[in-house]
Image: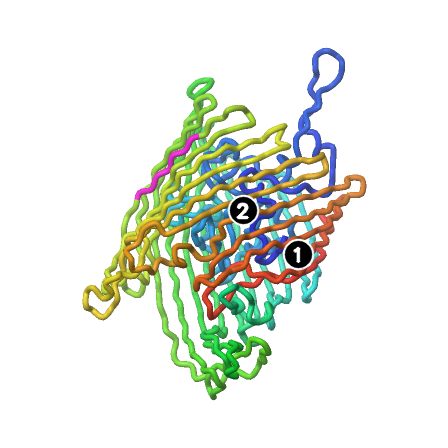
Amino acid sequence: MSFRIGTSALALAVGLIGAAPVMAQSTAQDQVSASEVDSGDGEGEQIIVTGRAQKLYRVEQTSAGKLPTEPLLSSQNIAVITQELIQDQGARDAQDIYRNISGVSFFSYAGVTARGFRQEEIFFDGLRGDPYAGFAVPQLFNLERVEFLKGPAGMLYGPGAPGGLFNYVTKKPDASAFKAELRGIVGNADRYGGSGEVNAPLGSGFTARGGLFYEDRGLFRFNASSRTLIADGGLAFDPGPVKIILQATQYDQELDANRLRGVPTDNAGNFLASRRWNHNEPSDFLNLNSTVFQGRIEAEPLAGLKIDATLRYNDATEVQQYHEPRGLFDSNRDGIVDATTREFRDQRRDEESWSMGANAVYGFAISQTVSNRVLLGFDHYTGKEVFAGRSLRGRTAPATGLPGPLSLLNPVYGQSNPATYNLGPFSVTSTDSRRTGFYVLDELTVGPLILVGGIRRDSFRDNANGIVFEDEKTTYRAGAVYRITDEISLFGQYATSFEPQDPSAQNPLAGGPFAPTAGDIIEGGIKTALMGGRIQSSLSAYRIRRENLLQADSRGDFGNDGVDDFTTFGEVTSKGIEFDLAADITPNWVLTVAYAYNNTRVTGDNGGGGITNRVGNRFANAPQHQLGFWTRYQIPSLGLAAAFGGDYVAEQLSLSGQRVQPYMIFDASLIYETGPIRAMLRVDNLFDKTYAVSGFIDRTGHFPGEPRSVFLEIGYRF
């Protein structure tokens, strides 16, 4: 498994069925689930064996649907990446875990392609407000798990893309026991770092948790490196029946020679430069500083009634100076493109947001075979972003006070000094956003049949440099589960979503304001957990339709006001099939296999084109096929486990229509665990394959996958 941006389908059964590879240390509890049951005839005991595929890296309930539900009883597809899986893979940031979610692949930075649609928004603990402003990639140190709710989620979360939604669940104080752990890591490319965490019940209902993470590593692109510091703490007070949780987190990240674009390619997808090529100077940087405070109240005032409310504040600043590739050219006129002009960009993003949300869940039995649960909730978000930027474009030849060109084949850094550039004043834009939603969801269980229905009403307002747009929208969800047996269930759902047009596109001179895009999904399938969970599978088919897409008006400047017009006539349809399997080949050997097929096409437009991310009739970075496998064998007597995985991603197209070649990469790890000590030796991109994970525009190229890398991580638990 490649840890940076490599695989997108390893251990994929974790997604829909919550399974993943086994841990190295074997105990009797791992192999026996309950079980000593008196047979009543005096002839001995009955042992019920639970499969490792069911036990390991599997959550008993998912929360992204806001009604805690067992995966087998849910009408939704929710992928869950647990803390154990994050640690077992040595994952550090969000790009490291995309491979674990079928139907999700890398697009750029923290953005993904989800079931054919580009998706970038991230929720934390069910609320809007991403502390990673702009182009920083979320880190995983302070996360308990990552949940990805597949398909439109408008009824539960409000505005969002129809392909799915990430919800990052943060670590919180745990009153059950004292826990502490120290970890250190060393690797190639001058990689080193460490972390420490402690969780301590303090008595009288108080529990405290604290964590500190630091890592310094050289990135494989020329001049690029990363330094990340996260300080995280929490205090919980649980006298019962009310629980109060206070949290504070500080994020500091310094990325040298960033922001990183891709490496230029030809139309066949072959790199025109080394995969290590970097358009940035050594003095370029991207620095993030972000502070988060969060408070949460949980209560159970009555039997069957649970209430929670969360308030979150986020203040983030991202500052960056970088050289953007602006145009490829032939520097010596030999017919071969061998250099690029560059543009220097000096940017600052300040984001401040408040998020709040509350939920009440009431469950009750109507009869022995009929029960009901009702969810009532609301959420509110206000955010302000101030962007200040200035830029200066260079030429094909060095010139005083301008950014110089850079060779693709023999780049020489240090000849362009931003301190000498003739930069003008900053251009400042300010955007204020507000989102408010109220929703109700009902779940009725009648014997083996579960019926779910919900409705939500949203209001939203955007103010971009004085251009104001506000509107309201209603979204719906309906689902059903039929449990054929305790091990097999059929499921189906219909859900809708919407997403406001970009505030910058609401200019009345261009035909604005424009109504939001609209999306819906029809999905159905079968889930199993056979032989006590030793064989788990999920098969689903879906159709997602996205309408009201903003695109260029074929009539041009229809209003004769000097600004070309837009129109919101457009439709895109995504169809797909996902199959996941996790199986115990033996008590010590686990295999997971996953396959995803997706076909996303333009199914309606006005002839004017211009639909975002459209490449002809296809869409950028939307592979039609993904296949991943992960197998792990452990030797309990030695405390050892060996793992091997592979990931295949089919051909893609870049935003400029250039081919992104298919790739297959392999990874391996060796884990030793005994008592409180755990050590992992990890090799990513085992055969050092050169490949691209996704494509951008032709002047910036494709994002290269990481070369072979090795690291050793050692941890000690107290």
- Labelled pair 2, 1 in contact (Cβ < 8 Å): no
Asked whether 663 falls inside the magenta stretch, the response is no
Across and down, in percent, residue 162 comes to: 40, 47
Identify the magenta region.
Answer: 474-480
Q: Main secondary structure of the magenta part?
A: strand
Identity of the residue drawn at 52% across and 66% down: 262
Name the side, left or right, on which 686 lies relative to 519: right
Q: Amino acid at mark 1?
A: Asp
Q: Which residue is mark 1?
A: 684
Across and down, in percent, residue 85 comes to: 62, 46
**What is the number of the mark on residue 522?**
none
In the rendered image, which quarter is residue 713 located in? bottom right
Q: Can the viewer see residue 131?
A: no
Q: Amino acid at mark 2?
A: Ile
Across and down, in percent, residue 475 comes to: 33, 42
* SS class, disc 1: strand
